[in-house]
Image: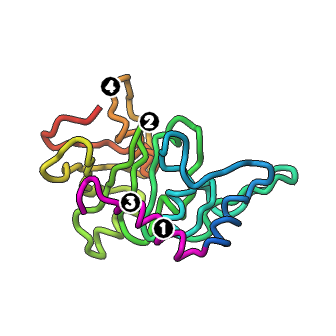
Amino acid sequence: LAEEGSGVVMTLYSAILSRGIEKVHFDLEAVEGCDVKIMGAHNYCSQEMVNLLLVGRAVPNVFDGVKDLDGLVLTGIHAQGSVGLVTLFEHYKSMEVGEHLKRPKAPIWVVCSESHFTILFLNDVSQASREATEAAEGQMHLAYYDQLSKQDAPIKLSVSWDARGGAVPEDNLTPPLEHCIRTRWPGATVDWNGTDPIL
């Protein structure tokens, strides 16, 4: 599609029509008294839109299942997604991403970091590599692609972690992507393999 094309809008229309307009409307009205929209302020992608595209439901939260807060029922992700999500907002304790999105069916994660979405995925999709993402300790090689950084190819990252999930020293120059990765693999160390980290 051409840059000035309508591919994104058509994808969104397709997702809405696949779910059904009435069901999307129901999803958006999950919190009584809130005026929730599928498109955020300044035409930004809302969490409801992200969830619709990731799991087929336009729910406002990313935790697993439903939470009842003294009669206020909040709806989250109902089942394991094919593609997952990691977000810088969880690192800052602004939201809780549930296991349904942290452990997707395919080893692919949408990354919500700062002002836009990027993608992180397992380079080797063999069964052994996929099982390694669930191990208590290990190392794996992930690829990271940020369309706004005009990369020629995905950045190759080596991620190591152990069962202790110990704290990693952090400073103001820790790349946001590393914070996102650690929401999925606590205490992980990230080797950028000679590439300058994206700050």
Q: Name the residue carrying label 1.
A: 13
Q: Secondary structure at mark 4?
A: loop
Magenta residues span 1-20
Q: How is the image coloured?
A: rainbow
Q: Badge 3 is on which residue?
A: 8
Q: Which residue is mark 4?
A: 173
- Position in image of residue 38 (x %, y %): 57, 55
Q: Are discs 1 and 2 less than 8 Å apart at CB?
A: no
Q: Earlier along the polypeptide chain: callout 3 or callout 1?
A: 3
Q: Is residue 190 above or below residue 126?
A: above
Contact (CB < 8 A) between labels 3 and 4? Answer: no
Extreme-right residue of the structure: 71
Q: Nearer the viewer, mark 2 or mark 3?
A: 3
Q: Residues within 10 Å of mark 2 (few under 14, many from 20)?
A: few
Q: CA distance from mark 2 to mark 3?
A: 39 Å
The answer to whether residue 143 is seen in the rendering is yes
Tag in front: 2 or 4:
4
Question: Closer to the camera, 120 or 9?
Answer: 9
Q: Give me the C-alpha separation between circle 3 and circle 1.
A: 9 Å
Query: Where's residue 192, x and y in %?
Result: 21, 42
x and y, in percent, of residue 165 in the image: 44, 45
The reply to whether callout 2 and callout 3 are in contact (CB within 8 Å) is: no
For residue 167, the mark is 2
Image position of 68 (left or right of 153):
right
Residue placed at 23% from the left, 35% from the top? Answer: 197
N-terminal of the pair, mark 1 or mark 2, is 1
